[in-house]
């Protein structure tokens, strides 16, 4: 009988190995399905980020050229400032973040970082300059230390620990059975949404990029975790040019500028106060979400009683 089972064991092992490979690949491409046709121009220079100004000039783009998603978008984020992008689902918010990484080439217009067209610089140098804290990070099946150190090849243990402290996850890691050597991911310890997000933040701190993209999670974390994470993110966004792709308006009130995107166009722009005063789409969305928060809190209150 054991003879009969051996090939099945082997098959099981092959299956697990392949599945694992897929999970690791998924982790690498969690942000987007990277298309293959994006190539560096011959002799493309490296991007040099001195200040970190990001500028979109009349950007037109569609995943399928027959269906344009962004219809001539222009905005500038001065170095070190924070831009929040809000708007209904499908408006094109995440697409803007993907274009900044040049995961796709645009149909017309230009995207510039410190005056350099991102389509004309080496992609490696472009991606090294931008850090992303994604909506939902898939962890590598490896140690928690590896998952943080992945932010930059050659990161030392001390740098990994400093990043974990910065992301307020160091103490949690020390409480794990093997500390930084604890295996996480599919085959290891499962981390909660908030813990995974902190690992993502720590990884970004190790990378220490001048430009930051925060893709806010659609699924709400509990409000205390949410607050703690907002605090950490606010801190790391302070000295960097930052784009926040936001679903909850409560997280964008401090942004230097907010773009209200609607169907691939900027419907409104300004600070939180300016947009509230304008009494348009943003003000309506704010009122609706405030009401939802209030009734959510009321529901929690009822449950506690
Ligand atoms: P949400 O708030 O729901 O995350 P969003 O504003 O970030 O939405 P995008 O993800 O930028 O919206 O999508 C904008 C449009 O582009 C949508 O109509 C979507 O269907 C389309 N789209 C997004 N990704 C792709 C893709 N890989 N291929 C084809 N179309 C896509």
Image (tube, rainbow, N blue to C red):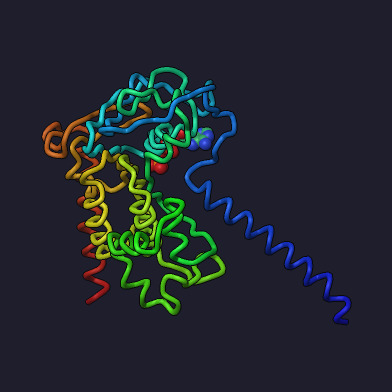
Confirm whether residue 246 shows in the render: yes
Residue extending furthest toward the bottom: 1
* Ligand 1 located in image quadrant: top left
Residue 2 placement: quadrant: bottom right
Would you say residue 89 is visible in this rendering? no
> In this image, 102 relative to 257: left or right?
right
Q: Which of 288 and 163 is in front in this view?
A: 163
Residue at the spot x=36%, y=77% of the render?
A: 175
Q: In this view, does 168 lie to the left or right of 138?
A: left
Residue 192 location, quadrant: bottom left
User: With respect to residue 173, does 261 lie above or below?
Assistant: above
Position of residue 253 measured from the top left corner of the image (x, y, whole percent): 18, 45
Residue 268 is drawn in which quadrant?
Answer: top left
Front residue of 281/25: it is: 25
The residue at the point 28 percent across, 48 percent down is: 248
The structure residue drawn at horizontal position 31% and vertical position 72%, both measured from the top left corner, is: 171
Q: Where is residue 293 in the image (x, y as percent from the top left)?
A: 23, 56
The number of numbered badges drawn on the structure is 0
Which of 266 and 127 lies nearest the eye of the viewer? 127
Measured as percent of width and height from the top left, residue 281 is found at 24, 34
Residue in the image at 41% along x and 56% along y: 155
Q: In this view, does 110 lie to the left or right of 188?
A: left
């Amino acid at each position: 009988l054991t003879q009969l089972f051996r090939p099945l064991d082997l098959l099981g092992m092959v299956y697990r190995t392949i599945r694992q490979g897929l999970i690791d690949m998924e982790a690498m491409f969690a942000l987007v399905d990277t298309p293959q046709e994006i190539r560096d121009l011959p002799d493309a220079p490296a991007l040099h980020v001195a200040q970190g100004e990001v500028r979109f000039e009349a950007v037109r783009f569609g995943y399928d050229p027959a269906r344009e998603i962004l219809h001539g978008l222009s905005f500038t984020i001065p170095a070190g400032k924070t831009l929040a992008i809000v708007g209904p689902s499908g408006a094109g918010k995440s697409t803007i973040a993907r274009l900044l990484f040049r995961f796709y080439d645009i149909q017309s217009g230009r995207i510039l970082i410190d005056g350099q067209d991102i389509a004309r610089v080496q992609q490696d140098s472009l991606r090294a300059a931008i850090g992303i804290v994604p909506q939902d990070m898939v962890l590598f099946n490896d140690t928690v230390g590896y998952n943080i150190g992945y932010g930059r090849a050659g990161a030392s243990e001390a740098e990994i620990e400093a990043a974990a402290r910065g992301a307020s996850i160091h103490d949690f890691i020390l409480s794990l059975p093997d500390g930084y050597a604890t295996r996480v991911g599919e085959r290891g310890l499962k981390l909660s949404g908030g813990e995974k997000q902190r690992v993502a933040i720590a990884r970004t701190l190790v990378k220490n990029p001048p430009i930051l993209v925060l893709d806010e999670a659609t699924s709400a974390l509990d409000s205390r975790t949410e607050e703690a994470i907002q605090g950490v993110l606010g801190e790391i966004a302070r000295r960097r040019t930052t784009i926040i792709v936001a679903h909850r308006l409560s997280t964008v009130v401090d942004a230097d500028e907010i773009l209200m995107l609607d169907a691939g166009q900027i419907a409104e722009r300004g600070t939180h106060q300016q947009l509230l005063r304008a009494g348009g789409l943003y003000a309506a969305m704010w009122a609706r979400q405030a009401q939802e928060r209030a009734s959510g809190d009321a529901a929690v209150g009822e449950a506690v009683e």
